């Protein structure tokens, strides 16, 4: 397997709005991030993925971009960005930008022109259609509720928006749009940034004729299966690769909703003709409902093991994985798979960080930050949660209280509460009024406290990251083969990683009860070293093993 830096990296995702506010307006900003680079460096990661910082009216917190080459007013200036980039580079940290080019904001100059008349020369930058029998051109639903089509009074046509009405989809079939996007990407690369995380990049190529999509039972609109992995997506990414990516030593990760193994092997192929790696979402869909994600069921551990194992094994040698459970769209993993305890946070971290692929740590995950009890829908800020609540309750499809409890469990806002820096007002995030509520548990869970406690989740994550990046086991952790053990065990996630005669054994009791299990003889030792464990003394490795609740350990055998 080819050795490259982005396979050996650990990425830290920053959601700027919620990270650190330097000027007291209640909104995180670039200077706030620069001021915390020492903290990020101390954690030991070498890449930051910055969620969008571009000029935006914030209908979807910056994922609706009005100018790709300007900084959002609330976040600061381009000089602030340049300073952040320079300070990060001085600390050996690279910066990966969020690239949101499936759609723009409706306030982007291109769209303002496009909607101005039917014969404007930018009309074809977006996807405009005539009404069908006086209604929407097809049955597609927006990912944020309602139809994916918006009627435009002025020019008497509909435009497509797979996300909010303020996020019109770009028409990638238009070569001029591709030229413009590639020019903009080149501008950022020339500035010296280190890569792109590509927002819903699997959705840029729409199917010919925009046919109706199949509808799930209980759904109001057609699903988005038809908009993912469309007919020209690989062709367009190869063109992007030839014209931009291949010219720079950068890393790329595609957010690929709806990706299958077969598709991932193309997007992230080892020949390097498209992207370096993709985010797949099958594992975070395992606790979803039939029609949508708004369910409260617990993930089955055998199903999770089967799924992650499939991705580990089937991309090995042909494409590259990214490994994650948390980001700005997911609830906190310690509340999802764990029981909110530091021990469960460490156990889940171990299970993920010992796998093959590039790990992503989302801000606050390294502290064991939990879901937040928001209460009524008025306390939420996320367009997805708010729209779903109104649509599903008003259509009589869900009971308000029941739906609210699912939103409490799954809402993206769980990830977006301010970073908990210390035990002072607003968790030290801002001196003003935070744009979204602070999780009331900040006095127990915060960075200052954890930095003063050698047994904290923070130092445990630091150790996990160091093991992968700078230890005698790095090669095995990064490049080793993966084998699952005990596939049916309901409590224990066990696997081995092997490379050139060396072998690691990873044991994680992902349950809140003690677990007893039997290991295959060849996995039961002898032990050469204990790499990490979360409960003081490492347990003695033997065929009949016992682990305490949330206990985990990694051995070299
Ligand atoms: C995926 C992003 O991660 C999410 O936050 C955003 O709302 C949608 N894409 C639309 O850009």
Image (cartoon, rainbow, N blue to C red):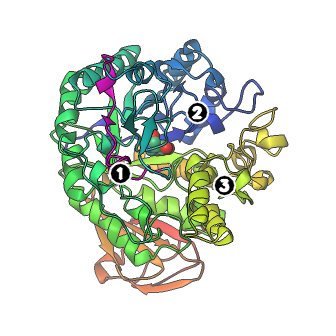
Q: Secondary structure at mark 1?
A: loop
Figure quadrant of the C terminus: bottom left
Q: Residues within 10 Å of mark 3 (few under 14, many from 20)?
A: many
- The secondary element bearing badge 3 is classed as loop
Tell me, yes or no, if residue 494 can be seen here. Answer: no
Location of residue 357 in the rendering, given as x and y in whole percent from the top left corner: 34, 51
The answer, for residue 257, to whether it is visible in the render is yes
Residue density around tag 2, few if under 14, some if 14–19, many if 20 or more, within 10 Å: some
Q: Residue at 58% across / 44% down in the picture?
A: 363
Q: Give the magenta part as a residue range.
A: 119-143
How far apart marks 3 and 2 lie (CA) works out to 35 Å
Q: Residue 108 location, x and y as percent?
A: 46, 23
Closer to us: mark 3 or mark 2? 2
Check mark 1 vs ligand 1: CB closer than 8 Å? yes or no. yes
Residue located 41% across and 33% down the image: 100
- Which badge, 2 or 1, is on the more N-terminal residue? 2
- Residue 434 lies, with reference to residue 393, above or below; the image says above
- Disc 2 target residue: 58
Q: Which residue is mark 3?
A: 456
Give the residue at the far front of this rendering. 133
Q: Nearer the viewer, residue 451 or 62?
A: 62
Using the numbered discs, state the Cα–Cα distance from disc 3 to disc 1 in whole angstroms.
Answer: 34 Å
Q: Main secondary structure of the magenta part?
A: loop
Residue 426 appears at what percent x and percent y? Answer: 80, 42
N-terminal-most mark, 3 or 1: 1
Q: Indicate yes or no whether the magenta region holds residue 66.
A: no
Q: Which residue is mark 1?
A: 257
Comparing 163 with 497, the one in front is: 163
């Amino acid at each position: 397997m080819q050795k490259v830096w982005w396979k050996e990296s650990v990425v830290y995702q920053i959601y700027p709005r919620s990270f650190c506010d330097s000027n007291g307006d209640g909104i995180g900003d670039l200077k706030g991030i620069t001021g915390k680079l020492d903290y990020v460096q101390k954690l030991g990661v070498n890449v930051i993925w910055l969620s969008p910082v571009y000029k935006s009216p914030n209908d979807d917190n910056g994922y609706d971009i009005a100018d790709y080459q300007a900084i959002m007013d609330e976040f600061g200036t381009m000089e602030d960005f340049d300073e952040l980039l320079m300070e990060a580079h001085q600390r050996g940290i690279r910066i990966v930008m969020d690239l949101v080019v499936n759609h723009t904001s409706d306030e982007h100059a291109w769209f303002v022109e496009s909607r101005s008349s039917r014969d404007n020369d930018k009309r074809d930058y977006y996807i405009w259609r005539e009404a069908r029998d006086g209604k929407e051109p097809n049955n597609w639903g927006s990912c944020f509720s309602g139809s994916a089509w918006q009627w435009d009074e002025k020019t008497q046509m509909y435009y497509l928006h797979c996300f909010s009405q303020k996020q019109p989809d770009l028409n990638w079939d238009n070569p001029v749009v591709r030229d413009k996007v590639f020019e903009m990407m080149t501008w950022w690369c020339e500035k010296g940034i280190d890569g792109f995380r590509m927002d819903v990049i699997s959705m840029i190529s729409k199917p010919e004729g925009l046919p109706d999509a199949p509808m799930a039972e209980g759904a109001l609109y057609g699903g988005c299966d038809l908009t993912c992995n469309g007919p020209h997506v690989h062709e367009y990414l190869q063109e992007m690769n030839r014209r931009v990516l291949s010219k720079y030593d950068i890393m790329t990760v595609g957010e690929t909703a709806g990706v299958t193994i077969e598709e991932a092997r193309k997007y992230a192929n080892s020949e390097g003709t498209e992207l370096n790696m993709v985010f797949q979402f099958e594992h975070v869909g395992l606790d979803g409902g039939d029609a949508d994600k708004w369910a409260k069921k617990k993930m089955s551990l055998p199903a999770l093991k089967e799924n992650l194992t499939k991705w580990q094994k089937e991309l090995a040698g042909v494409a590259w994985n990214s490994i994650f459970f948390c980001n700005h769209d997911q609830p906190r993993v310690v509340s999802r798979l764990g029981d909110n305890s530091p021990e469960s946070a460490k156990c889940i971290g171990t299970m993920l960080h010992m796998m093959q692929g590039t790990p992503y740590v989302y801000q606050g995950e390294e502290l064991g930050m939990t879901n937040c009890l928001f209460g009524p829908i008025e306390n939420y800020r996320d367009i997805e949660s708010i729209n779903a609540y109104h649509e599903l309750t008003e259509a009589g499809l869900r009971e308000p209280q029941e739906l609210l409890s699912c939103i409490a469990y799954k809402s993206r806002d769980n990830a977006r509460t301010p970073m908990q820096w210390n035990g002072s007002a607003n968790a030290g995030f801002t001196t003003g009024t935070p744009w979204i509520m602070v999780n009331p548990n900040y006095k127990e869970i915060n960075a200052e406290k954890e930095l003063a406690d050698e047994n904290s989740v923070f130092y445990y994550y630091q150790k996990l990251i160091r093991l992968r990046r700078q230890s005698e086991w790095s090669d095995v952790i990064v490049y080793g083969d993966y084998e699952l053990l005990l596939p049916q065990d309901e409590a224990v996630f066990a696997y081995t990683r092997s490379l050139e005669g060396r072998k690691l054994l990873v044991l994680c009791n992902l349950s809140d009860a003690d677990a007893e299990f039997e290991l295959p003889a060849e996995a039961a030792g002898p032990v050469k070293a204990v790499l990490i464990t979360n409960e003081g003394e490492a347990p003695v490795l033997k065929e009949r093993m016992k682990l305490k609740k949330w206990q985990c350990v990694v051995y070299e055998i």
